[in-house]
């Protein structure tokens, strides 16, 4: 089910007895749990009828006993199991007692399995929850929904922002709502009584994500803007960025650009490319990343992208082996990448 259906059920007071919340969008996932608490428990009864158990340290019998406990001075109680190992690929699959119990979960208990990140849908516990309850994936919002959410938050703060500057803000703030919310709050506080959010204010107050800085760096390299690329590198390092992380991110970005170029040539749609890259990374890749990589890949030939990937890998290995000073090596790499013929030989 869509996680929006969870919010609809809460709003319409149609809350079930069994849920699984998982996915990368932690902010929305936590918001859904908070709304469940408010709807089910109400003020003053939170401590009496709200119970959280850490899945890694709890036996099936503990979950069953907690589920059988009757609510106090209320119709229902909320039991949350966090990061149960039987829902992950690395965890144990031995939860037979719990799996069979879910079929007879009492209506007085709302049991929520709350998991960080991905789950393994092959596991029997997942299948039991899907059979007897509701499974909601809290995926990262796409660009359209991010615009809607962020625009609404600015309006609620009595702030105005143009569509162009809203996109600029999201480019810098990234695609994780928790980080966006923090940067938005900081920006709203900084602007005080001024109703209009400008690009200059965003540049002043919103720290760009590492991913955004790498996008900028690749854009400068694609435009053969050597001075701008080196300036961006200096700025990145001035913010105490890990230089080996920069090399790793450049490697990953060039790899994604190559894959986007090759998949596009095979006729794959952007959504299918998202799925392919997500499978490779073993984590959900945001559609905006695929869009940006596909755009940037047009500035390079397949041969140039492969050479850039090899060069990033060689620099990482040689710098760690002490064969070259890492910052000098990265600066030389950028200079070579910006050269007109893209020659990457030493």
Image (cartoon, helix red, strand yellow):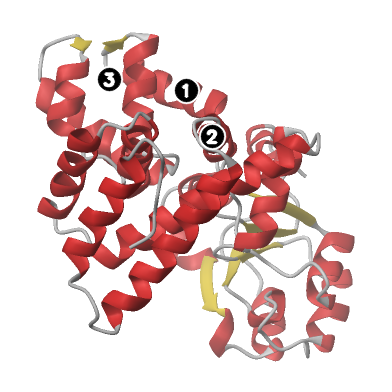
Q: Secondary structure at mark 1?
A: helix
Q: In this orientation, which residue lies closer to the viewer: 93 or 217?
A: 217
* Residue with the mark numbered 3: 157
Question: On the picture, is 127 further left or further right than 137?
Answer: right
Spatial CA span between label 1 and label 2: 12 Å
Which residue lies at the image location 41% right of the left edge and 61% below the top edge? Answer: 311
Question: On the picture, is 335 further left or further right than 57?
Answer: left
The vertical placement of 163 against 192, above or below, is above
The vertical placement of 288 against 100, above or below, is above
Cβ–Cβ under 8 Å for marks 3 and 2:
no
Cβ–Cβ under 8 Å for marks 1 and 2:
no
Q: Secondary structure at mark 2?
A: helix
* Residue with the mark numbered 1: 147
| Mark whose residue sits in front, 1 or 2 | 2
First in residue order: circle 1 vs circle 3: 1
* Residue with the mark numbered 2: 288
Q: Position of residue 127 (x, y in %)?
A: 86, 68
């Amino acid at each position: 089910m869509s996680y929006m259906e969870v919010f609809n059920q809460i709003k319409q007071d149609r809350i079930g007895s069994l849920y699984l919340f998982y996915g990368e969008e932690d902010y929305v996932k936590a918001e859904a749990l908070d709304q469940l608490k408010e709807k089910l428990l109400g003020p003053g009864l939170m401590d009496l009828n709200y119970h959280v158990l850490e899945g890694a340290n709890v036996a099936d019998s503990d979950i069953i006993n907690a589920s059988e406990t009757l609510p106090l001075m209320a119709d229902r109680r909320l039991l949350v199991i966090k990061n149960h190992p039987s829902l992950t690929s690395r965890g144990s699959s031995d939860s037979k007692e719990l799996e069979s119990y879910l079929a007879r979960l009492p209506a007085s208990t709302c049991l929520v399995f709350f998991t960080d990140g991905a789950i393994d849908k092959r596991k029997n516990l997942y299948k039991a929850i899907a059979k007897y309850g509701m499974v909601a994936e809290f995926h990262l919002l796409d660009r359209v929904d991010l615009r809607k959410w962020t625009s609404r938050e600015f309006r609620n703060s009595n702030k105005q922002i143009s569509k162009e500057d809203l996109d600029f803000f999201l480019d810098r703030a990234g695609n994780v709502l928790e980080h966006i919310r923090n940067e938005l709050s900081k920006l709203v506080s900084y602007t005080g009584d001024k109703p209009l959010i400008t690009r200059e204010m965003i540049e002043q107050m919103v720290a760009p994500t590492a991913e955004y800085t790498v996008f900028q760096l690749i854009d400068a390299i694609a435009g053969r803007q050597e001075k701008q690329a080196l300036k961006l590198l200096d700025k990145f390092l001035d913010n105490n960025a890990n230089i080996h992380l920069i090399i790793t991110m450049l490697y990953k970005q060039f790899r994604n650009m190559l894959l986007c170029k090759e998949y596009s040539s095979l006729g794959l749609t952007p959504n299918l490319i998202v799925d392919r890259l997500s499978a490779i990374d073993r984590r959900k890749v945001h559609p905006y990343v695929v869009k940006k990589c596909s755009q940037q890949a047009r500035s390079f030939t397949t041969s140039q992208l492969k050479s850039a990937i090899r060069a990033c890998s060689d620099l990482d290995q040689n710098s760690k082996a002490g064969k070259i000073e890492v910052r000098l090596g990265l600066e030389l790499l950028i200079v070579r990448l910006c050269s007109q013929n893209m020659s990457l030989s030493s």
